[in-house]
Image (cartoon, helix red, strand yellow):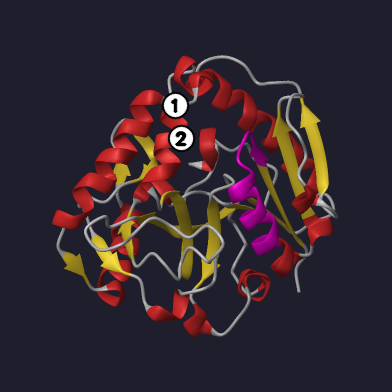
Amino acid sequence: MKRIAALTMVRNDDFFLGKWTAYYGDLLGKDNLFIFFDGEDQKVPDCTAGCHVEVIPRVAGNVRVSDKERIGVMSARAARLLKEYDMVIGSDVDEFLIVDPSVGKSLPEFLSEQKTEGRNSLSGLGCDVIQDTSCEPALDFAAGILSQRKFVRLSPRYTKTSVLLAPVEWGSGFHRTRRGDFHIIPNLYLFHFGCADTSFIGQKLEDKDLASRGWDRHLHKRRRLIDNLPALKERSWDVWTVRARKLQSVIRLPYTPNKPAMLNLQIKVRLPERFSGLV
């Protein structure tokens, strides 16, 4: 079994941090989790007990500038970790790398079997979990998210270079690496939960700090995704995850040639029941 670490950076998000530490802690062991807190004003919650925690000075500036500085911190830490680990998973705190339960293997078992020669990263297919307000009520925060949300939008934005195999630099938000290309692995998915409840977006829109750093545009885009989801036709998970993976493996954005794309298709699929309860 290969040695695998996971890292993230967080600010004012104890809910998802609790989910993140529980999910990756169960799979990898909390002693293999590395968490940065963005700002010395941050209180370290109890859920991080047993993890490696570092509180760093606030990364200031607008979202574009601060994202680059944050990813630089995490790329540098990943490079050091790769001297003792075989792989380093990097994700935002509301993102979870999940193996299809039909495979019957844990995340570390699955990743340990993957081809790594000639590659500097591995990717899961991006799945944006979005609340369908026409049929799904507000989240019960004491229960699992995937037991309450049944629809995802297949999104190349969240097909990220989530697993580093070599000490290369991530691009902002883990969306790419500075060298190399995407290797999107069958049966591996990156689930993003930032649109899983309208309250997540509402709370952030009220955050004056986020507004001052230019987050409003991105958050309004997330709200539009929720508003538009009920009108999208429901597609087959089994058919469209395969198609999306093939498309994203060969198509790249013309203005960012090392980011995947899929012809601007808006594909909504129902999540199979076997995923329920994983997060």
**Extent of the magenta region:** 9-24
Image quadrant of residue 216?
Answer: top left
Query: Is the residue 217 above or below the residue 94 in the image?
Result: above
Question: Can residue 82 be seen by looking at this rendering?
Answer: no
- Determine if the magenta segment contains residue 16: yes
Quarter of the picture holding the N terminus:
bottom right
Which residue in the protein does label 2 denote? 203
Query: Is the residue 229 above or below the residue 277 in the image?
Result: above
Q: Nearer the viewer, residue 49 or 250?
A: 49
- Contact? badges 2 and 1 (CB < 8 Å): yes
Q: Residue at x 31, y 32 (%)?
A: 220
Dot 2 falls on a residue whose secondary structure is helix
Q: Nearer the viewer, residue 199 or 225?
A: 199
Q: Residue at x 55, y 27 (%)?
A: 67
Within-10-Å neighbours for mark 1: few <14, some 14–19, many 20+: few
Which residue in the protein does label 1 denote? 206
Dot 1 falls on a residue whose secondary structure is loop
Whether residue 100 sits left or right of residue 70 in the image: it is left
Quarter of the picture holding the C terminus:
bottom right
Query: Is the residue 210 above or below the residue 232 in the image?
Result: above
Question: Can residue 115 be seen by looking at this rendering?
Answer: yes
What x and y, as percent, mark residue 165? Answer: 66, 54
What x and y, as percent, mark residue 222? Answer: 33, 40
What separation in Å lies between label 2 and label 1 (alpha carbons)? 5 Å
Q: Main secondary structure of the magenta part?
A: helix
What x and y, as percent, mark residue 90? Answer: 63, 48
Residue type at mark 1 is: Glu
Residue type at mark 2 is: Gln
Whether residue 4 sits left or right of residue 23 in the image: it is right
What x and y, as percent, mark residue 71? Answer: 62, 32
Q: Nearer the viewer, residue 163 or 270?
A: 270
